[in-house]
Amino acid sequence: MWWWEKTPNFLDSYEEQRQRFMINRLRLITRISLMICVTVALLFLLFPGVPVKAKIDVIITVGSIAICTIIAGILCQNNLTSRYPSRIFLGLSWSAIFIEQITSLVLFGDIEPSTDVWTLIFITQATIVPVLWYLHLISQLGTVGFYFILYRLANHTLENNAFYYAHQGLYLVWICIICNFSVYLYERLQKIEFSARQELRIAQEKTERLLLNILPQSIAERLKQQNATIADSFEEVSVLFADIVGFTELSTQMSPSKLVELLNKIFSRFDKLAEYHKVEKIKTIGDAYMVVSGLPDERKDHVKAIANMALDMQKSLDEFNRENNQSFRIRIGISTGPAVAGVIGLKKFAYDLWGDTVNTASRMESHGIPGCIQVCEDSYQRLKDKYILEKRGLIKVKGKGEMMTYLLKSLIGE
């Protein structure tokens, strides 16, 4: 049985999990205690030759202990009192021992220590509720202290029974030492296990975050569940390619660290925009940036989302230039159509796109105008009713021949 009895909540502290464990185990120990009471009562009541006085003693003792056990069980179920499992533990422990000792004294005048009962209770506690060794020690010291109080009240003296009491005392001392030491070792092991689980959880979270930075969440989940190649076909998506004009030439005039720092700042802004518009960043190649809308989760407004992304990228770069005293311009190309997406390779794998739509978007960018957003005919037809677009006309595109292109200016009404 696990330390926490149920599936652990890794957000809980060790103390919270230990408290939940104690309550669960106290519920268990109340059931066991009731079964012990029933079996002991049946033994005395049904076994032939047992004196009536002994039967009465057992009924009173066992009945009283059973009542206290039921009360402890109810306290364990109550949301208010279950916050104090240590108090329930001590109450249940002492009630069983004290009741037995008091009834023996009252009914029979017997003040001898009930070592068999004490041993049974101490071992049961140590094996079923093995937490907080000092709590077990308090329970044991309280038992001994209560016994000496009764002993003094009864005006008993050791007389000729000194060796007997020494023998019984040594026996109980070793029972207590073994119980407390076993509880200490068990809890120490659980603390080590808890720390290991927490470290594993943190490592898993880091791995998960790293994986989600590389792959879309749905693709990451599929990749963890299957070893087969992941490839999906989409009837219509919108692809955006962006390139920072003149950035390559700038690399000859600036230190590598400064260059990378500027590029990181720009692309970090674009990453935030991609998250805001819920489009999927595919990759960066040098100073080129690629995103797609409409996959891996299909959406009807993919063209609108990619258009808004492109317009916001222009505005974001303008803000960056003002804040950093730069004069970067961006060239953006957009294409709409079918595409295939998937994960290939065994090492350094990445989620990527293939198809004519991807090639066209790349050509729209490379054959575009600095500072402008160039779109193909298919994208234009889906944007013309809600966006302002300027007809650029036919341009000769490498590998595609002549294509009609348009420049996306803004959303209508802005």
Image: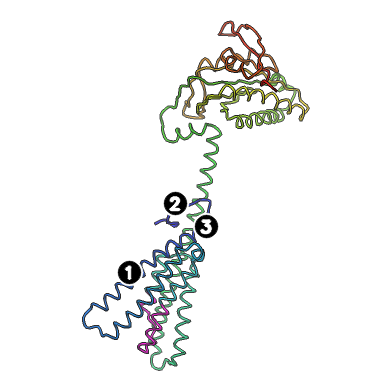
Relative side of 297 to 397, left or right: left
Residue under label 3, please give it. Answer: 14
Q: Are marks 3 and 1 in contact (CB under 8 Å)?
A: no
Residue 226: where, in percent of width, then height? 41, 33
The answer for how far apart the CA atoms under marks 3 and 1 are is: 32 Å
Disc 1 secondary structure class: helix
Amino acid type of the residue that numbered disc 1 sits on in the rendered structure: Met
- Residue 90 higher or lower than 337, as above or below: below
Residue 280: where, in percent of width, then height? 56, 28
Give neighbour class at mark 1: few <14, some 14-19, many 20+ (Cα, 10 Å): few
The answer for how far apart the CA atoms under marks 1 and 2 are is: 28 Å
Q: Residue furthest left?
A: 48
Residue in front for this viewpoint, 231 or 390:
390
Residue under label 1, please give it. Answer: 35
Q: Residue at x 59, y 21 (%)?
A: 240
The answer for how far apart the CA atoms under marks 2 and 3 are is: 14 Å
Q: Residue at x 76, y 22 (%)?
A: 327
Q: Are marks 1 and 2 in contact (CB under 8 Å)?
A: no
Disc 3 secondary structure class: helix
Give neighbour class at mark 2: few <14, some 14-19, many 20+ (Cα, 10 Å): few
| The N terminus - image quarter | bottom left
What number is the disc on residue 7? Answer: 2
